[in-house]
Image (spheres, rainbow, N blue to C red):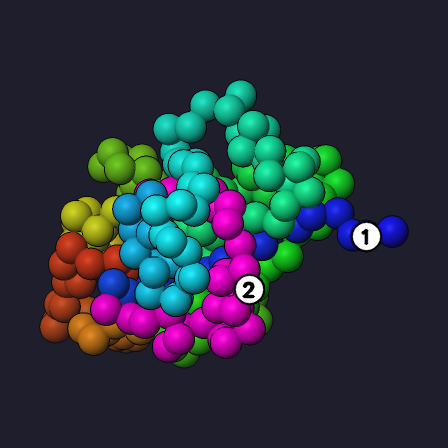
């Protein structure tokens, strides 16, 4: 008896100037080339990625369905149609690992609910790369996603993260929309204790990659805002 069709989770390079072969192992790229059905966040960038992977295509003939933050919950099940018809398919994020801080998690849950195989392929994760490069506690860490945007709620969230980090000796990892990066950094420097360690990793794996890890006091004396680039923030408070 043949195995059920599989949903392959395909990581995408983090930086626009990174080639697929620089970020993904050869077997993962080879698998991508065998598939014709994809669920993606953005069709234009997905076609660019698939073309860069050397997909035998033609690219215009590939079947791409969009799943983003605006996709109604009731529309997700229909995206599994290729699996129900016995065809393997793939889920792509805009960058990095799919279904992590990404709307694709809903598709993965739906695939599991129907008994289809879910196969994660190896590739870049901005969260893990930033943690690796931070020098902070890597054995106990928590990904907090996006912090609140509003001032008082954001300050309260930062204080909670710092308190939790100190109590559990746990690195707190979080992200922000690029155009709000500098405002978040400024709030962190205003709110956190001087001896809390703060790392900011921006444009990971790209030509303009920058990674800095220092105490909040050092950040205050020599600020280095990441600007409007994809960035990961990490903090570890002294216990």
SS of the residue at dot 2? helix
Asked whether the residues under the numbered discs 1 and 2 touch, taking CB atoms below 8 Å apart as contact, a structural biologist would say no
Frontmost residue, 96 versus 172: 96
Residue 61's place in the image compared with 77, above or below, is below
SS of the residue at dot 1? loop
Q: Which residues are magenta?
A: 17-42
In the picture provided, is 94 more to the left or to the right than 75? left
Where residue 94 appears, as percent x and y from the top left, is 36, 51
In the picture provided, is 67 more to the left or to the right than 231? right
In the picture provided, is 139 more to the left or to the right than 2? left
Frontmost residue, 163 versus 114: 114
- Residue 78 magenta-highlighted: no
- Residue at left 49%, top 62%? 33
Residue 62 seen by the camera = yes
- Residue at left 26%, top 58%? 230
Where residue 232 appears, as percent x and y from the top left, is 33, 60
Local crowd size for mark 2, using a 10 Å CA cut-off: few (<14), some (14–19), many (≥20): some
- Residue at left 42%, top 50%? 93
Tag count in the figure?
2
Where residue 182 appears, as percent x and y from the top left, is 16, 54
Frontmost residue, 165 versus 30: 30
Residue placed under numbered mark 2 in the picture = 31
Residue 177's place in the image compared with 71, above or below, is below
Residue 15 placement: quadrant: bottom left
- Residue at left 34%, top 47%? 60
Residue 217 seen by the camera = no
Residue placed under numbered mark 1 in the picture = 2
- Which label is found at residue 153? none
Q: Earlier in the sequence, mark 1 or mark 2?
A: 1
Q: CA distance from mark 1 to mark 2?
A: 18 Å
Frontmost residue, 8 versus 227: 8
């Amino acid at each position: 008896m043949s195995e059920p069709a599989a949903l392959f989770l395909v990581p995408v390079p983090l930086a626009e100037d990174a080639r697929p072969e620089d970020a993904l192992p050869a077997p993962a790229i080879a698998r991508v080339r065998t598939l014709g059905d994809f669920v993606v966040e953005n069709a234009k960038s997905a076609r660019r990625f698939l073309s860069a992977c050397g997909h035998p295509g033609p690219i215009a003939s590939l079947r791409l369905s969009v799943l983003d933050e605006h996709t109604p919950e009731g529309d997700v099940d229909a995206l599994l149609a290729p699996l129900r018809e016995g065809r393997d398919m793939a889920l792509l994020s805009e960058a990095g690992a799919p279904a992590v801080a990404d709307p694709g998690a809903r598709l993965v849950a739906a695939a599991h609910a129907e008994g289809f195989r879910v196969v994660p392929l190896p590739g870049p994760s901005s969260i893990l790369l930033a943690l690796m490069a931070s020098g902070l506690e890597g054995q106990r860490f928590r990904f907090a996603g996006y912090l609140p945007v509003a001032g008082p709620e954001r300050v309260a969230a930062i204080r909670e993260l710092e308190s939790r980090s100190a109590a559990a000796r746990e690195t707190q990892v979080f992200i922000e929309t690029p155009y709000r990066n500098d405002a978040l950094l400024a709030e962190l420097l205003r709110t956190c204790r001087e001896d809390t360690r703060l790392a900011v990793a921006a444009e990971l794996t790209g030509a303009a990659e920058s990674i800095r890890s220092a105490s909040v006091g050092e950040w205050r004396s020599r600020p280095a805002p990441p600007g409007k680039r994809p960035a990961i923030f990490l903090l570890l408070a002294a216990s």
